[in-house]
Image: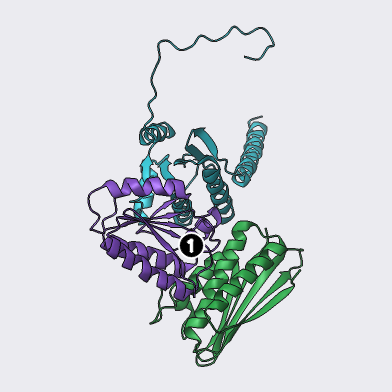
């Protein structure tokens, strides 16, 4: 079973590859079909953001299995890029927000589908989004 | 003696309210059943509070039931839901939207005047949701939508005689 | 680059999406569908996605845009075969498919489309009902 996965995100076909691999990992981990769909879609949203906004270089996605002290098992998705970064994370997470060209639904949508999400960003440096989903 | 009685009463009331609280807890943890009340008509009686986990479970079983039974109408009954706040309302609307995607029309029943006012105050857009006040009215509408009619044929059938101890 | 085949049956277009679409493929599909609606004078479009396991916000909005464009050109769009998991995800994602009708499978989708097409010319964007 794949314990973790790492892919570079540079072209649009990487979006499909990323979500297929994430879905497969979720399936192997025992997530139900609906959660697999949620995870795959969240990955799709996050990787698309990288393709759209971090155009200067390839981004990266890694998907890892995680567990906590109580024995819960889950999946952690980390999407990072060296793009422009975000000035106002709160604003970007607000539903329907579009930053010019349109980060649109990417972040708020992904957050709704996953259980936890944290965003590390710095203007001019890049962004790292970490999202987790726990198996029920 | 009055003191003892009062104390006993207080204890009884306390015990009863704990028991009620516990029962409410149990109810809210129960799965929301999806009932096929007729060919093509599903009913979803919502009892207890709706949180995210329960709504997700409700969504999943409802949608699967719609696909399995080919249902065209879903009657969601909120008579048993204690209160509706924005979060619960959102959850409900999600369920309704998801059902629509699978081709099932959703009727929301059990709306009270107080609930209607709450929803108005919350500024919810329910323009695309059909509502009725009772399950009976919802069912009637469902039959109409499906082109069905309930007709009384002569006298109701006589009940068979029941022997002692035997099942009817 | 994958081209999604579009079949014309009378005044109805049938589109079956059999694999994950790249963003550019999806946009090409939009162009192709609208071009054919206009060229054939189609009154209805049936898009079957029963094989699709994931519809994200991009594809969701694109499908909605295809429906919007088709309506402007006088055709109704029915999306058939949304899987329950996909339906739930779409709803939770917050994608609204306001411009199109949906059906659980192609059979029902076809019937729905025929019914929708019978009405007065759908030139406007008004929702029925």
Question: In the rendered image of this protein, does residue B18 appear above or below residue A90?
Answer: above
Name the colouring of the figure.
by chain
Residue A84: percent from the left, percent from the top?
49, 89
Chain B, colour shown: cyan
Q: Is residue C39 left or right of residue B6?
A: left
Quarter of the view holding residue B9: top right
- Which residue is drawn at the image coordinates 51% and 92% (left, top)? A56
**Which subunit holds the residue at mark 1?**
C
The residue shown at (47%, 55%) is B94
Mark 1, secondary structure of its residue = loop
Residue A125 image point, x, y percent: 54, 92
Q: Specify whether residue A117 is in view.
A: no
Please tell me whether residue B90 is drawn above or below residue A127 in the rendered image: above
Say whether residue A132 is left or right of residue B62. Answer: right
Among the chains pictured, the one given purple colouring is C
Q: Nearer the viewer, residue B6 or A111?
A: A111
x then y, percent, for residue C116: 32, 48
Could one spot residue B146 in this view of the protein? yes
Q: Quadrant of residue C79?
A: bottom left
Characterize the local packing of mark 1: few (<14), some (14-19) or many (20 or more) Cα atoms within 10 angstroms.
Answer: some
Q: Residue at x 48, y 49 (%)?
A: C105
Viewer-nearest residue: B63 or A1: A1
Chain identifier for the green-coloured part of the image:
A
Question: Total of numbered circles in the picture?
Answer: 1
* Residue at image mark 1: C17
Q: Position of residue B119 (x, y in %)?
A: 38, 51
């Amino acid at each position: 079973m794949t314990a973790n996965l790492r892919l570079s995100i540079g072209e649009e076909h990487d979006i499909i590859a990323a979500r297929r691999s994430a879905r497969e990992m979720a399936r192997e981990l025992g997530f139900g079909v609906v959660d697999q769909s949620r995870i795959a879609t969240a990955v799709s949203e996050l990787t698309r953001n990288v393709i759209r906004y971090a155009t200067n270089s390839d981004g990266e996605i890694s998907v890892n299995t995680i567990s906590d002290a109580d024995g819960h098992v889950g999946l952690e998705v980390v999407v990072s890029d060296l793009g422009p970064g975000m000035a106002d994370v709160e604003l970007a997470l607000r539903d329907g927000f579009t930053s010019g060209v349109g980060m649109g639904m990417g972040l708020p949508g992904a957050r709704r589908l996953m259980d936890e999400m944290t965003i590390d960003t710095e203007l001019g440096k890049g962004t790292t989004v970490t999202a987790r989903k726990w198996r029920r | 003696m009055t003191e003892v009685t009062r104390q006993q009463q207080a204890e009884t009331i306390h015990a009863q309210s704990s028991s009620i609280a516990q029962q409410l807890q149990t109810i809210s943890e129960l799965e929301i059943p999806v009932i096929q009340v007729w060919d093509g008509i599903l009913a979803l009686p919502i009892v207890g509070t709706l949180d995210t986990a329960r709504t997700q479970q409700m969504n999943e079983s409802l949608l699967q039931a719609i696909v399995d039974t080919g249902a065209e109408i879903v009657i969601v009954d909120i008579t048993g839901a204690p209160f509706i706040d924005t979060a619960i309302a959102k959850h409900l609307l999600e369920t309704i939207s998801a059902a629509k995607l699978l081709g099932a029309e959703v009727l929301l029943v059990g709306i009270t005047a107080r609930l209607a006012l709450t929803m108005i105050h919350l500024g919810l857009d329910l323009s695309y949701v059909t509502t009725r006040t009772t399950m009976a009215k919802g069912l009637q509408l469902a039959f109409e939508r499906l082109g069905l009619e309930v007709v009384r044929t002569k006298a109701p059938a006589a009940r068979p005689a029941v022997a002692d101890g035997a099942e009817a | 680059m994958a081209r999604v085949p579009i079949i014309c049956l009378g005044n109805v277009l049938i589109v079956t999406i059999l694999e994950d679409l790249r963003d550019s493929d999806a946009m090409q599909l939009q162009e192709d569908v609208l071009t054919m609606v206009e060229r054939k004078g189609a009154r209805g479009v049936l898009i079957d996605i029963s094989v699709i396991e994931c519809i994200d916000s991009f594809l969701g909005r694109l499908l909605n845009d295809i429906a919007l464009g088709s309506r402007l050109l006088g055709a109704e769009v029915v999306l058939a075969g949304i899987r329950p998991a996909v339906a739930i995800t779409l709803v939770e994602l917050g994608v609204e498919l306001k411009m199109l009708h949906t059906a659980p499978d192609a059979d029902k989708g076809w019937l729905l489309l025929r019914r929708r097409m019978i009405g007065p010319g759908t030139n406007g964007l008004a929702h029925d009902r």
